[in-house]
Structures are given as structure tokens and as C-alpha cells.
Amino acid sequence: MNMFRFRDRVGVLDERSQHFLKTLAWLGGYVTPEQAQELGIRNSVTRVHVLLKDLESWGFIKAVSAYPAIYQVTKSVTRLLGADLSARREHTMETIRTRLLTVNFYLEAIRWPAEFVFDHKQKLTKLCQLVGEPALLPYRGSKPYLWQDLVLQRPSGEVVLTMVDHFGRHSYRQLYRHLKRFAPSLGPDGLRLMIVVSSEHREQLFCRKLHHARLQRLLQEQGVDLPLRDMVTIYRVRRAVPVVRPLITNRQQLRELRARRLADRGRGGLAAPDQTCHPQQRNPHQ
């Protein structure tokens, strides 16, 4: 068996591993070993770590952080999925944490119960059943675009369009853009919006924005007379998201790091070991 060939590598995946990788790609592409176990990849901690290392050696995931361990899907998973959701591309530390928050939300939401709709055609079908007119959906180019939107359906049939709060981005701007994308679709009783946050502070920020007059006018301009607070739910995820400490894998980066350390020694001081590895984090409480 040639493990450099995609079909041979796919051949060693069992059904549970394939389902795990596809779900992970839909949720943003990043996972910790603890999340992987809850996603059902394996039942014990030891087996989870062994399989993650196997998936890494087979080229389906790669490590992006040493401690805590964080893995990202590769191009092979997007080939397996049949769609490139940007999950395999390079991202900022804030985006990685946001996608880990998305996985935490998924692990809580599937116990409500609620069904996550990942397939793009199914998303369009479910929304069109409520809205009735495809032209009211968000578009990219000349086609409806919901590829990267989280869509949930409750047992009652209610569809929830979900936005995950991005670490470091302004709460008002995120909420405004989310409303502007979906405001033309709002109105039917079976369609609601949800904002997923990571802390009590962010929850309070978004709750205050639900009383903002400009946001309410945005709904009224689309013929929606319901108060914004009745259209949007703020959900706080209980599990904390780890701080991401990226690996240095590029040889050029390693050479530059060594050169800086030698230069610092020559000046009589030594740079802090994480000075290069840790990009400066933006304030998450804007």
C-alpha cells in the first residue's frame, strides 16, 4: 500500500474516523484531544491520542500547538469532504480559538436536542421552506451562499441561524453584519438567530446590543416588527477555550529565532522564549 496516494490513505480510515474528520471540517477544522474524545473518535484517552497520531502520520491532520495539543485538518480532509471550507488554511490565533469555541458549542448543542445541518443543499432547502423565496437568502456572486453558516434545526422544526462570537472582534459590528445578512429572511415564526459567546462578559455585551435602536431599525426596514431581543438568543458556552501557542515548524523561522537569540546574547540579554512564538493577542472584550 502506497501511503502517499490519497485513495490508499482513505482506505485505512474506519467509518468512525471518516465521520470525525468530516464533522471537524464543517465545524472549522481545529480540535483538541479532549474534544476529539467527546466527538466519539475513540472511547479512551489513550486510544484517542494514538489515533490522532495515526491521522497525523497519514496526512489528515497536523499539529498546530504543542501544549495544549491542537490539531488542524489538512487538504486531504477537504478532498474527503468534497468542499474547501477554508478549514485547512492558515489562520490567526483568534480565529483558531473561535473555531475551538465552535466545537465546544457543537458538543453542548447536540444534547439539547438539536440537529446540525451541514450539507449546503439541505441548508438552502430548509431555509427556502420557511422563507419561500431564495432571493431573500444571503448571496455570494450569483448564488445563495450558506457554506460557512451554522444552521441548526430543533425537533419543533424551528431553524436557528447561528453566529459564533469571534475572539477579538467588536460585538456590535459582528451582530450588525449577522443581522444584515439574514434580515431579509427574518419574519417567519420558525426562523431565529443565535449568537454563541465564550464568557459572561461577552454575553452581557451582546445582550446590551439587542436594545440598540439602529439594529432594531434594520429589522423594521425589512418589515419585521418583532423586538430584536425576541429574534436573537445569546448562548454562553460553559467550557473554556484554551490559549493557542503555535508550533514553529518553518526552518526559516527557526533560523531567525536563533539569530535573534544570538544577537540578544551579544547585547548582554536573552529574549523571552515565547517572544517570537506568541503573536500579540487583540483585546477580546472590545
Image (tube, rainbow, N blue to C red):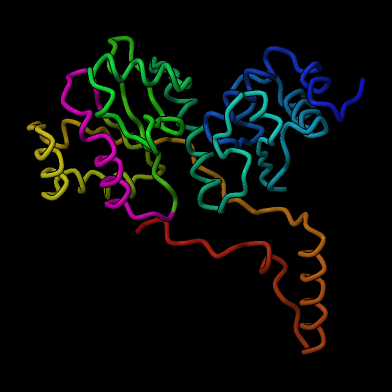
Q: Quadrant of the N terminus?
A: top right
Q: How many marks?
A: 0
Question: Which residue is at the far left?
Answer: 225
- Chief SS of the magenta region: helix
Q: Quadrant of the C terminus?
A: bottom left
Q: Is 170 colored magenta in this rendering?
A: yes
- Give the side of residue 224 with respect to residue 167, left or right: left
State the residue in front, 236 or 213: 213
As drawn, 196 above or below 204: above
State the residue in front, 85 or 70: 85
Q: Which residues are magenta?
A: 168-192
Residue at (52, 31) in percent of width and height: 27
Residue at (67, 23) in percent of width and height: 80
Residue 40 falls in which quadrant of the image? top right
Residue at (49, 44) in percent of width and height: 98
Q: Is 81 colored magenta in this rendering?
A: no
